Amino acid sequence: MTTESVPRLAVVRALLVVSGGPVALALGGLLAPISAARKWPERLSSPPARRAAWTVTSAATLTPWVYALLLRPWLRRWGASQAERTASYPGDIERPLFTTTRAVTVHAPAHEVWSWLVQIGRDRGGFYSYDWLENLAGCRLRSASRVHPEWQHLDAGDSLEVFPGYATTIEAIDPPRSMLIANWGAYVVEPVTPHTCRLIARSHAERGLAGAAYILFIELPHAIMERRMLLGIKERAEVARHRTRDSLA
């Protein structure tokens, strides 16, 4: 990971945007039962106010459990088949804290999907996710709406800018099949038919403090943004394929 002179306020802003939701979720689950135990809603004067207070307390208490038991497992395996979840991909490590595999079917040839994938980067094609949220964190990007020939080549060791002044590196790349990004994970394009493929995202959380910090601060926004990224690539590749078909008709 490489860093240049990033203003401190920009870093703080990015951290607040990225980790604000998960931290609020965790604090809600911790503080709501404490508030309930102290019976603070019963001290309110009117029955409607007490009912509203208990509703808020109950929702804040249950939401983290709903996320942990239902939403989190679904996000970790979103779209992936059992075979994909147990398959080996570039960057796999021994005994991770946990492994995440997400995938989507794209109705476009694998090489065309690769053309969209290989141009990701803040200073290149963007990340095809929620640009407004990325920009709220200070990324200052705009996801590409077409394939750019000048962004079609990457080598192992090349940098991939994530945030202004903050970049990771390409650890390994095997065009047009897989790309391994340091401190991020792997993206794999697997052909199904000549006109259909699977786009797969694989990442790991390591044991120890780094894994715990990832779960608390990064996992939820990463899941939301990566799911949208996979769908963003799918949408762009399929629209481009339809336009090609229409032009040849």
Image: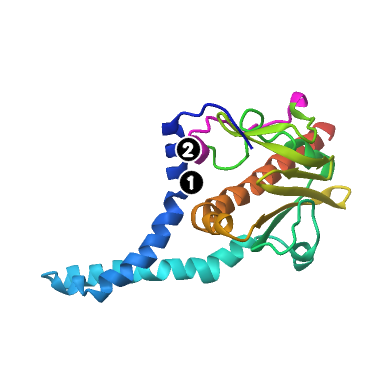
Q: Give the range drawn in magenta.
A: 132-150
> Which label was assigned to residue 18?
1
Give, as a three-letter code, the residue at label 2. Answer: Ala
Question: Is residue 236 visible in this depiction of the protein?
Answer: yes
| Pointers 1 and 2 in contact (C-beta within 8 Å) | yes
Instruction: Report the side of 174 relative to 60 (left or right).
Output: right
Does residue 87 lie above or below 39 as drawn? above
| Mark 2, secondary structure of its residue | loop
Rendering coords of residue 21 (x, y %): 43, 53
Sequence order check, earlier mark of 1 and 2: 1
Hey, which residue is sitting farthest left in the picture?
Answer: 45
Q: Quadrant of the C terminus?
A: top right
Left or right, residue 23 beside residue 187 = left
In the image, residue 234 above or below residue 205: above
Residue positioned most to the right: 194
Question: At numbered mark 1, what does the secondary structure look like: helix, strand or loop?
Answer: helix
Name the residue furthest top. 150
Identify the residue position indicated by label 2 in the image. Answer: 137
Quadrant of the image occupied by residue 12: top left
Q: Is residue 69 magenta?
A: no
Q: Quadrant of the N terminus?
A: top right
Q: Position of residue 202 (x, y in %)?
A: 71, 54
For the point 76% across and 34% down, the residue is 157
Camera-nearest residue between 185 and 196: 185
Q: Which of 155 and 84 is in front in this view?
A: 155
The residue closer to the viewer here, 108 or 88, is: 88
Q: Residue 179: where, in percent of width, then height?
A: 77, 43
